Image (spheres, helix red, strand yellow):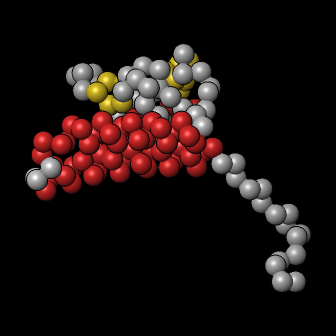
Amino acid sequence: MKRIALEQAQPGQILANKIQRADGVLLAAQGAVVSEALLRMLTRLNIETIVIEEEEKLTAEELEEIFQKRRAEVSARFERVDRLPLMMALQDAIIDQARRARDESLAALIPEAPAPPADAPADGA
């Protein structure tokens, strides 16, 4: 475990502890994958530090496995309300948020291509 300033947190890191508001409302569960959306929310709430697992990046396969597990958990929680449009919209929104977190974490795994040198000729020249 490692406590870091929120500014140092990166998508793809794993929370070692849950994050709660002062009134006890759960903001993020232990083991959650840090996403850009989570970082924005914590910044808005003036959270200054988080505790992450040691710098172990997940593989694309592990991220997909986590997403599929969370998707199944959400679907199981909503299975009794499958005929209520508002509840189904809520389920879809939760799954979409998990999908975006996975996609942001996957993007963090892909190194950016280096910029071409300033004096490099343009394509077709």
Locate residue 37 relative to residue 63 in the image: left or right.
left
Instruction: Where is residue 47? Give x, y as percent.
Output: 40, 29
Q: In the figure, residue 23 lies in which quadrant? A: top left
Q: Toward the viewer: 81 or 36?
A: 81
The residue shown at (41%, 41%) is 68
Looking at the image, the residue that sits furthest to the top is 1
The residue shown at (26%, 42%) is 75
The residue shown at (56%, 18%) is 2
Q: In the figure, residue 32 lies in which quadrant? A: top left
Locate residue 93 relative to residue 124 in the image: left or right.
left
Q: Toward the viewer: 13 or 95?
A: 95
Position above or below: 108 against 50: below
Locate residue 85 relative to residue 45 in the image: left or right.
left
Position above or below: 19 against 73: above
Instruction: Where is residue 21? Give x, y as percent.
Output: 29, 25
Position above or below: 118 against 57: below
The residue shown at (63%, 43%) is 109
Q: Quadrant of the C terminus?
A: bottom right
Q: Can I make out residue 101 in this image?
A: yes
Instruction: Where is residue 74? Give x, y as percent.
Output: 28, 39
Instruction: Where is residue 115? Give x, y as percent.
Output: 77, 60
Locate residue 87 relative to residue 56 in the image: left or right.
left
